[in-house]
Image (tube, helix red, strand yellow):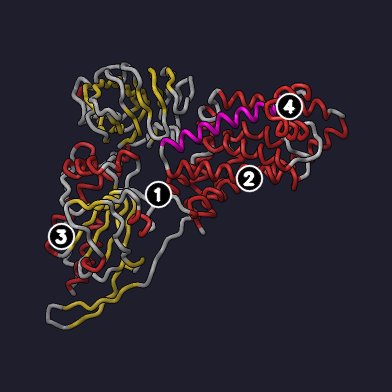
Amino acid sequence: MILFTIAYLAGVLTIVSPCILPVLPFVFARAGQPFAKSILPMLIGKVVTFAGVATLAAIGGDWAVQANEAGRYAAIAVLAAFGVMLLSPQLTAIVTRPAVALGNRLSHRAAGQKASVGGSLLLGVATGLLWAPCAGPILGLVLTGAALHGANVETTLLLTAYAAGAATSLALAVLAGGRVFEAMKRSLGLGERLRQGLGVAVLAGVAAIALGLDTGLLTGLSYAGTTNIEQSLLNRLRADTSGATVNRAASTADGQQQTYQSSLSVEGILPPLDGAVEWLNSKPLTVEELRGKVVLVDFWTYSCINCIRTIPYVRAWAEKYRDQGLVVIGVHAPEFAFEKSIGNVKRAVRDFKIGYPVAIDNDFAIWRAFGNSYWPAHYFIDAEGRIRHHHFGEGEYEQSERVIQELLAEAAGSRRNGSNLVRPEAKGAEAAADFANLQSGEDYVGYMRAANFVSPEGVAADAPRDYTTGKPRLNQWSLAGNWTIGAEQATLNQAGGGIAYKFSARDLHLVLGPGTGGRKVRFQVKVDGAAPGPDHGSDIDRDGNGTVSETRLYQLVRQSGEVRERTFEIRFLDPGVEAFVFTFG
């Protein structure tokens, strides 16, 4: 219920986002007309269409993206025709000639005649298609959660709740707007001019959408204006789970039994580990055969920088406490499509020197069983199969290891021995982030979650376009050359293209892949217009030269001196590279 509440309230917040501006003229065109026959059908059409399109986006696949784009173009055509009909009844007849029945309904409706449920539904469908790719940044979280929970009824209901929230705020706005419009008509007699003005506004909105301003400039404004509100909403509504404390009997030095109370509560029961498509380093493990063992379940994905930085600790715990009864299970749950490749995961397991069992959870069966929502996420299970502690994200390694020690002590019937804690030597991308000097955050390149993109041409979704660098400010990025920006990644079509990012952090990472052909892509990095020298990352040399040979995270910058604001540029000498996400440390 909490997730549905969050989704609904997040949808309500879209009314304050500039990204909603191109849609408002279409909505206010129905102001002053009967709510049941005009406004309500339009809002229903919008909610149903958005939920359907967003569900397709959630379950992924190029076919869904293509369907979404086709629907977008169709919506632009419908709304352009609607704007023309508002301008002139004469033009209405011309525009609607190929579809007389549909056109008559829309033209009568646009001219203020008897309300048409069908016309309003059609307008709602078009509005929903246009609004779907333009909604605020919290939609990225909603879609991620929906995708991870699979294509089911809950997915569609969650997205419907989000759309219903937006429809609620739009309904309130249009009802208030209707009273304003009626007052203007009665006092000034400008009904005809008002209708024509709405037509102009509709066509202006169509032009903005067709030029990509709604998903480019306006989406950027939306991100800057609403992220803090949305994050605050999530923080307030996220519920913490806790359970009863556990009493344990421990043996003292003189052999007497002493009861003490564990500091760890019971948070749940270890769920089944069924559903992994393959297990690495082990046969499939079951809850039954893990009984009597202390278990650490680590949810990770191999291109996630936060996961990469926790691996040295998880690996060290697995090695140190294996003989004392600890079983570490890595559950690899992919964020990107390329992370579903079993070959890619095997290579990552080898490169990270992971020797403990890894379940490849491509279908998110284990993820859903735990009700998990994070990378990385650690769940600590006692010898009786009860979840006793969890930790999300990086850090708190000492506390996590103390939990392991306490659970092992419980299983052995003794007090925690307080042995020394691990101090792994982490190199390259595995090294801990310099959080004290970290002023840049994660930025996705694909249009589904992209923000802070400043190439003046704007985003052309799923279509080749020539881009120019523009003038990025801090935490902004741009493309140069001919690229195709897809839902998850941008693909370089011609050699010589590049990416620029202005950042402030010790480390800069970029997830890159050689593309579908698998051909290696050479590249060169510059920092502030020069070779990086001592500031080069682990995947390039001092001159900035490197090669994309596999799809993974590449460390391209590690500032060796004082961390300050820098301009990063990468130029690719071969075509075909795919760029996914920037991360920093």
Magenta-colored span: 62-85
Element marked by disc 2: helix
Q: Which residue is mark 1?
A: 148
First of labels 2, 4 by sequence position: 4
Q: Which residue is mark 4?
A: 85
**Image side of residue 21 versus residue 30, left or right:** left
Element marked by disc 3: helix
- Quarter of the picture holding the C terminus: top left
- The answer to whether the residue labelled 1 contacts the one labelled 2, judged by CB atoms less than 8 Å apart, is no
Would residue 12 be visible to someone looking at this image?
no
The span from disc 4 to disc 1 (Cα, nearest Å) is 43 Å
Crowding near the residue tagged with mark 3, few <14, some 14–19, many ≥20 C-alpha atoms within 10 Å: some
Residue 85 in the image: state x and y as whole percent: 73, 27
Q: Quadrant of residue 579?
A: top left
Q: Which residue is mark 3?
A: 321
Of residues 84 and 261, the one nearer the viewer is 84
Q: Amino acid at mark 4?
A: Met
**Image side of residue 263 versus residue 64, left or right:** left
- Label 4 vs label 1, nearer the camera: 4
The span from disc 1 to disc 3 (Cα, nearest Å) is 32 Å
